[in-house]
Image (cartoon, rainbow, N blue to C red):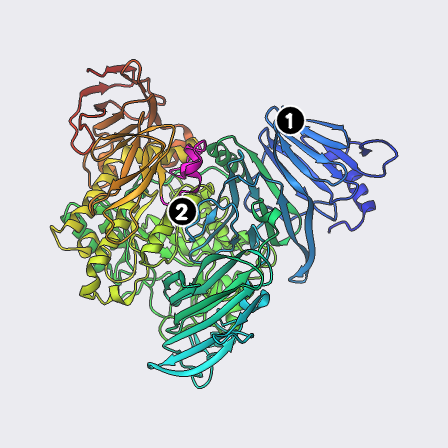
């Protein structure tokens, strides 16, 4: 129960166990009734003169926890993202100059006694970040319980760069000045954690819908704009609706709103919508065109958001600002901005081809200027305002602090970093086995094949039982995959039909969300079936959920889990309010309170279940379509959802993946080629086959340098041998990149190990390694793959070169030719279809293995060390068994390798750890002008390494 008075607050100080010996005293003189201060081990609680009570505590010498609560009791439900923490030593607390100051050796947190504002400073007094003077709390009732909507604005430097926040496919890299809604969706991942170039990070401990930047949601077009038709009449745009090529209706619409499927249509599945103007009725028009103008009442930068599916084109003042396509069952947002002045009209033309799809264009007035570039976070449902400040100074140290709070990134099995093949979908066990056998017959490397959804009988979703007509012996199928030296991953949804025994067992324990059933909502399978999702917020429900998976699937020997629809996604096109109704109440509280965290509990059910199961030492591996802070501790990689096969979507994957990685979760992937395809591709129209193949080629090149390398999508089939003819340039390129990925496995698996042992990040924003070069801050289509590789994917059709930036502070080698370039410059790099521009930082040491067909085949074989001279450098080559949790028990090895530029020596140091045996190294020195690039290099030296230091001299 929350306290409702200051008297109750004072009593809470007096009787709280953690501060029982701490006196309540005033700051700044006995004459002041407030502030009041309570001090305990590594924390202080302050009731300021004119602000909200706040509790500040040190978690480590570089991490501070801030909780503010108008009630003053600081009571909140258990944090799902943060794991238990020990109390730090050496924290001092003092009161001076009307403030309370907590100090570690690395950081000072100061609480203003008048306002309660918290500031963070270096020990020498230099400011890092401070809160703006006022926190915002708005009382609200959710599910019959009292909560607040909360917001905190920080007085951050307007020039800072902000990164992280999960996965958002808007092409954004630096979020300064942007508005980002953190709400789980098929293609959006909400991670309320950010990194600043101001040498700090913020973990915002809230599971509800959260917003970075402007706290206001987008509104209808005519809410704050003057909207006129094409003749200038105020009231709305002119809408023209066409059916079978004929104009059938003309309207005036201030807010053309086809955003969500109406609730009363859910009972009919995909259904028809009686929303279009007469005489269309329930018929979907072929085309809608809106024309007219908009004008603002407020000067400044106005933000617009187009939500929709099918083909959408928006033109403002003759300039095309949106031209996109989305599959109809999974709409998305597309944003643009417009500088507007009061009274100035801007011509608007919108064309939409509905095809039973969705559309709305929305608007947001400018945020106050003093907040536009400020760090601001707000949440819809909260018991308290709760966040963690993490001191840098580097992005890697901030991410390490994030994992201190939310858990280590446990290691995935080695094979997870090989190539995966999937499609939507293998309909029989023969199809799956034939596809894998084809890879082996053609000597195309592969480690994992994926069985997607619908291996059950049509009316049996959630039974976890295979359709015997199509999968007569799934256990034998798994054995056959293993016999071909591969693994098989299987898709499991948290979704159940009421007719299944699993549903009935879950429902009996209160583990089923009832909203879908009460709505009578049918899914899209066959005639449509009633369905519901499991509540994962109860330990009993998680254990029952896993036991059903274990009994029916895990017992057959499957190697990994594809946990789909974990937003959870009951339907991809319902409002937030309707989705919350369908996904709650949870066992822990209202669904609105836990809107974003379902995926964390879902992964927890599988991870904890399997680690406590029949093979507890076998590494768990989960692929899940969503994520939330802490997901990395449950052996989970995430993918970017059901994206579409378009060049814009390829480009947007780059910044989406980089920011997701900078959100503290290192294992990320995407559907190579895009999941959903336009009819021009699915029909295999000869006019578009070349573009389809080129799109897949460019996407595949990007995929080979992503943390997880996997191909998946709807028809056309995505297997390498199905994408292009044998011997063609496209197929040869795909195979070459697959083989390059496998040759790089010693490098990649070391990066993977570093995510656990060193809190490392595989896919790295340029700002992580080159923060002192401000040009890198906003680059959204390049990134570092580990410490060595600068990756610059090609994302334009028919492009045979691309402009790219070589960051300052290093020299760079072209990986293909060995040509050396100075950093700090833009270049126009050659990009023939068979090559993606790839550069290596001077001083890098890149270990590469031999040509292999699967990851386990390369264990213990020779390693080539490519030394890119020109600067000092180092690398620690890691190894372990790749399969078990023995690494947690210290069973691993590291070989420290160092290049000394001045001495022209490669020093391979004493091995750390006892794992592994003798190793043969072939050393290649890459130097300017020799053509000694990896593509055509012969070794300069060969050494047998037995675990003791050796020195290899580079000869002139």
Establish if 178 lies above or below 345: above
Q: Nearer the viewer, residue 877 or 33?
A: 33
From this viewpoint, is residue 440 visible?
Answer: yes
Establish if 180 lies above or below 841: below
Res 915 → quadrant: top left
Q: Which quadrant does the C terminus fall into?
A: top left
161 relative to 139 in the view: left or right: left
**What is the residue that sits farthest to the left in this orientation?**
727
Place of residue 205 in the rendered image (x, y in percent of width and height, measured from the top left): 58, 45
Establish if 743 lies above or below 541: above
Q: Is residue 86 magenta?
A: no
The residue that disc 2 covers is 655
The residue that disc 1 covers is 125
From this viewpoint, is residue 635 visible?
Answer: no
Q: Are marks 2 and 1 in contact (CB under 8 Å)?
A: no
Task: Please tell me how many numbered marks the rendered image carries.
Answer: 2
**Residue at x-position 29% and y-position 32%:** 840
Establish if 885 lies above or below 461: above
Place of residue 647 in the rendered image (x, y in percent of width and height, measured from the top left): 31, 55
428 relative to 34 in the view: left or right: left
Q: Nearer the viewer, residue 294 or 98?
A: 294
Place of residue 664 in the rendered image (x, y in percent of width and height, measured from the top left): 46, 40
Which badge, 2 or 1, is on the more N-terminal residue?
Answer: 1
């Amino acid at each position: 129960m929350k306290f409702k008075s200051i008297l109750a607050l004072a009593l809470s100080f007096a009787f709280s166990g953690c501060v029982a010996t701490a006196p309540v005293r005033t700051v700044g003189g006995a004459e002041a009734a407030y502030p009041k201060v309570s001090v305990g081990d590594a924390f202080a609680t302050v009731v300021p003169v004119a602000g909200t009570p706040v509790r500040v505590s040190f978690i480590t010498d570089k991490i501070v926890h801030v909780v503010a609560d108008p009630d003053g009791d600081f009571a909140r439900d258990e944090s799902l993202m943060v794991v238990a923490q020990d109390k730090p030593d050496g924290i001092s607390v003092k009161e001076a100059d009307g403030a309370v100051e907590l100090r570690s050796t690395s950081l000072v947190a100061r609480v203003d006694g008048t306002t309660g504002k918290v500031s963070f400073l270096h020990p020498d007094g230099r400011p890092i970040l401070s809160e703006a003077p006022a926190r915002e709390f708005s009382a609200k009732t959710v599910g019959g319980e009292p909560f607040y909507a909360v917001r905190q604005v920080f007085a951050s430097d307007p020039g800072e760069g902000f990164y992280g926040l999960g996965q958002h496919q808007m092409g954004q890299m630096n979020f300064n000045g942007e508005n980002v809604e953190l709400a789980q969706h098929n293609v959006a991942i909400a991670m309320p954690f950010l990194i600043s170039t101001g040498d700090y990070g913020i973990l915002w401990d809230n599971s509800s819908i959260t917003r970075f930047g402007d706290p206001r949601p987008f509104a209808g077009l005519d809410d704050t704009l003057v909207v006129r038709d094409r003749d200038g009449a105020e009231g709305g745009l002119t809408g023209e609706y066409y059916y079978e090529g004929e104009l059938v209706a003309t309207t005036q619409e201030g807010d053309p709103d086809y955003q969500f499927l109406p609730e009363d249509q859910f009972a009919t599945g995909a259904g028809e919508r009686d929303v279009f103007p007469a005489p269309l009725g329930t018929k979907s028009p072929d085309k809608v065109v809106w024309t007219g103008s908009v004008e603002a009442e407020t000067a400044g930068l106005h933000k617009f958001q187009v939500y929709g599916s099918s083909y959408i084109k928006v033109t403002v003042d003759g300039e095309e600002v949106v031209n996109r396509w989305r599959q109809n069952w999974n709409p998305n947002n597309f944003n643009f901005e417009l500088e507007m002045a009061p009274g100035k009209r801007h011509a608007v033309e919108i064309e939409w081809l509905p095809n039973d799809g969705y559309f709305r264009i929305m608007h947001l007035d400018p945020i106050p200027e003093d907040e536009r570039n400020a760090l601001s976070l707000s949440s819809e449902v909260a018991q308290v305002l709760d966040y963690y400040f993490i001191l840098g100074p580097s992005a890697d140290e901030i991410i390490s602090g994030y994992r201190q709070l939310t858990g280590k990134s446990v290691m995935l099995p080695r094979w997870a970093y090989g190539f995966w093949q999937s499609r939507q979908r293998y309909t029989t066990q023969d199809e799956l086995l034939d596809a894998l056998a084809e890879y082996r017959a053609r000597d195309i490397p592969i480690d994992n094949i994926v069985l997607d959804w619908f291996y059950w009988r049509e009316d049996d979703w959630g039974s976890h039982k295979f359709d015997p007509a199509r999968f007569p012996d799934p256990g034998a199928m798994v054995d056959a995959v293993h016999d071909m030296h591969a693994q098989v991953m299987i898709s499991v949804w948290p979704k159940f039909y009421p007719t299944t025994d699993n549903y009935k067992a879950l429902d009996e324990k209160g583990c089923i969300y009832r909203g879908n059933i009460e709505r009578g909502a049918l899914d899209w399978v066959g005639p449509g079936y009633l369905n519901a999702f499991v509540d994962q917020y109860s330990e009993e429900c998680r254990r029952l959920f896993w036991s059903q998976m274990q009994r029916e699937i895990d017992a057959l020997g499957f190697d990994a889990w594809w946990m789909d629809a974990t937003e959870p996604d009951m339907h991809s096109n319902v409002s937030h309010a309707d989705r919350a109704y369908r996904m709650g109440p949870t066992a822990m509280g209202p669904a609105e309170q836990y809107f974003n965290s379902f995926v964390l509990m879902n992964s927890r059910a599988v991870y904890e279940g399997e680690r406590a199961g029949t093979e507890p030492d076998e590494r768990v591996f989960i692929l899940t379509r969503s994520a939330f802070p802490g997901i990395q501790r449950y052996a989970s990689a995430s993918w970017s959802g059901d994206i579409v096969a378009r060049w814009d979507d390829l480009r947007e994957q780059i910044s989406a993946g980089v920011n997701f990685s900078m959100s503290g979760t290192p294992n990320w992937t995407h559907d190579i080629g895009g999941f959903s395809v336009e009819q021009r591709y699915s029909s295999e129209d000869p006019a578009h086959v070349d573009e389809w193949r080129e799109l897949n080629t460019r996407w595949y090149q990007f995929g080979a340098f992503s943390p997880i390398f996997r191909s998946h999508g709807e028809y056309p089939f995505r297997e390498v041998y199905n994408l292009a003819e044998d011997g063609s340039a496209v197929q040869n390129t795909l195979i070459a990149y697959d083989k390059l990925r496998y040759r790089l496995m010693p490098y990649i698996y070391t990066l993977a190990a570093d995510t656990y042992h060193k809190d490392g990040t595989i896919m790295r924003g340029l700002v992580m390694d080159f923060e002192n070069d401000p040009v890198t801050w906003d680059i959204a289509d390049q990134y570092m793959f580990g410490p060595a590789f600068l990756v610059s994917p090609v994302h334009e059709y028919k492009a045979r070169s691309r402009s790219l930036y070589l960051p300052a502070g290093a020299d760079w080698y072209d990986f293909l030719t060995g040509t050396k370039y100075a950093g700090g410059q833009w270049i126009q790099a050659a990009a023939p279809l068979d090559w993606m521009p790839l550069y290596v930082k001077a001083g890098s040491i890149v270990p590469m293995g031999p040509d292999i067909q699967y990851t386990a085949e390369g264990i213990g074989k020779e390693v080539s060390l490519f030394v890119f001279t020109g600067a000092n450098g180092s690398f620690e080559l890691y190894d372990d068994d790749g399969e078990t949790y023995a690494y947690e028990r210290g069973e691993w090895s590291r070989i420290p390798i160092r290049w000394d530029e001045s001495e022209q020596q490669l020093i391979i140091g004493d091995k750390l750890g006892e794992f592994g045996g003798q190793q043969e190294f072939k050393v290649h020195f890459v130097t300017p002008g020799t053509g000694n690039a990896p593509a055509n290099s012969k070794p300069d030296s060969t050494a047998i390494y037995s675990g003791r230091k050796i020195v290899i001299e580079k000869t002139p």
